[in-house]
Image: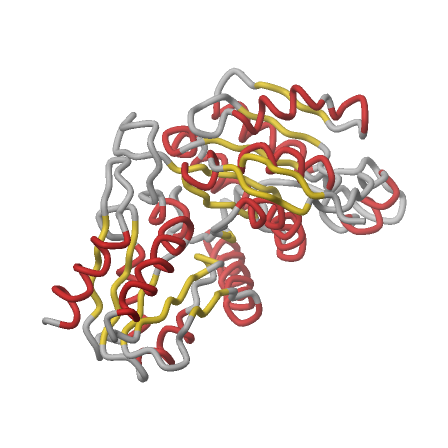
Amino acid sequence: MAEVKLMKGNEVIAEAAIRCGCDVYYGYPITPQSEVMETLMARKPWEETGMVVLQAESEISSINMVYGAAACGKKAMTSSSSPGISLMQEGLTYLAGAELPCLVVDVVRGGPGLGTIQPAQSDYFQATKGGGHGDYHLIVLAPASVQEMNDFVGLGFDLAFKYRNPAMILADGVIGQMMEKVQLSEYKPRWTEEEIEKMSDSWALTGKKAHRSHNTITSLELDSYKQETFNHKLQAKYHAMEENEVRFEEIQCEDAEYLFAAYGSASRICQKAVQLCREQGIKVGILRPITLYPFPTKEIERLSKQVKGILTVEMSAGQMVEDVRLAAKFKIPVEHYGRFGGVIPTPEEIVEALKKQIIGA
């Protein structure tokens, strides 16, 4: 029988990590995601599954500890919030450059700088455009509920290992702090050393083996032509993600004449805005990207041929709107409405923005 509990989004991240067989969590506390580590410390998974939980001395330390564990084929994860994720950028580009799987959770707060501890969605650029140096991408999942916070931990690890690439759960402070009913995942045992060797023998650091030469984990290549060849390999991998891993949700799009594009908690607010619009005879739907990378470009392009205009709703100054405009190929109006600095938009504000910026344009 499924186990159902009332839990906070941050808490269920920790619970899901234990249940999916995570080997190590290295992190550093920062609001609004500190409950991830606090829950892990309270649960003491090292007594239950052998999972290691360690508070590092900084975010820089924690991401490099993740690098070391991932290099050994372990399920390694960390979590932080916006300024802390900024400190991890060098480590993340090293992980991408070494083709190492891991899971990073970013529960976004308002910025820039130290900003506020209130929720925001202003890390979109940082998450989807690389964030660190070089041509690379993270796999980025955007949950809109506590249930998806649970589900995306296992999915994030699955995708990370499938593509040997860092994956990120990009939540916001609303989803991290809110409480909802959640159906918890079934327990999966941690991989044994034998299982890790079988799955990752071609790349992981599993000790000296008679049947193969040494595995080397590095993101350094001093030969420019070899580095160019490696970058072509990475781009082919990202193309495969774009072809096979795009995830999205369409809400009341069948007869829609206008479209909201929103993710995370903003998409939930848009559901009430859709109800208000339809009560006024305005046919509106929602396109909710679930994977922010790879982005549902083709789906937005298809819908742009059906609707008269798109309003992106983000808790930021407007970041995803750029990708929506590119997907719509500038053939219809695409505008942005958002509140930022930790302010959450209301459904009524969104309806008025649609009327003013799209319908009345």
Q: Determine the residue positioned at 74% across, 43% down.
A: 3
Q: Position of residue 123 (x, y in %)?
A: 35, 43
Quadrant location, the C terminus: bottom left
Q: What is the total number of numbered labels drawn onto the structure image?
A: 0
120 or 66: which is nearer to us? 120
Q: Determine the residue positioned at 65% across, 20% down.
A: 41
129 or 328: which is nearer to us? 328
Extreme-top residue of the structure: 57
99 or 307: which is nearer to us? 307
Direction from residue 38 to residue 24 in the image, left or right = right
174 or 61: which is nearer to us? 174
Q: Position of residue 204 (x, y in %)?
A: 73, 43
In the image, residue 10 sits, relative to residue 213, either above or below, namely above
Q: Position of residue 74 (x, y in %)?
A: 72, 38
In the image, residue 65 sits, relative to residue 6, either above or below, namely above
Extreme-left residue of the structure: 361
Direction from residue 207 to residue 334 in the image, left or right = left
In the image, residue 176 sits, relative to residue 281, either above or below, namely above
Q: Determine the residue positioned at 53% across, 72% down.
A: 243
Q: Where is residue 285 in the image (x, y as percent from the top left)?
A: 36, 71
Q: Determine the residue positioned at 35% across, 77% down.
A: 301
Extreme-front residue of the structure: 279
Direction from residue 177 to residue 64 in the image, left or right = right
**Which colour style is shown?**
secondary structure
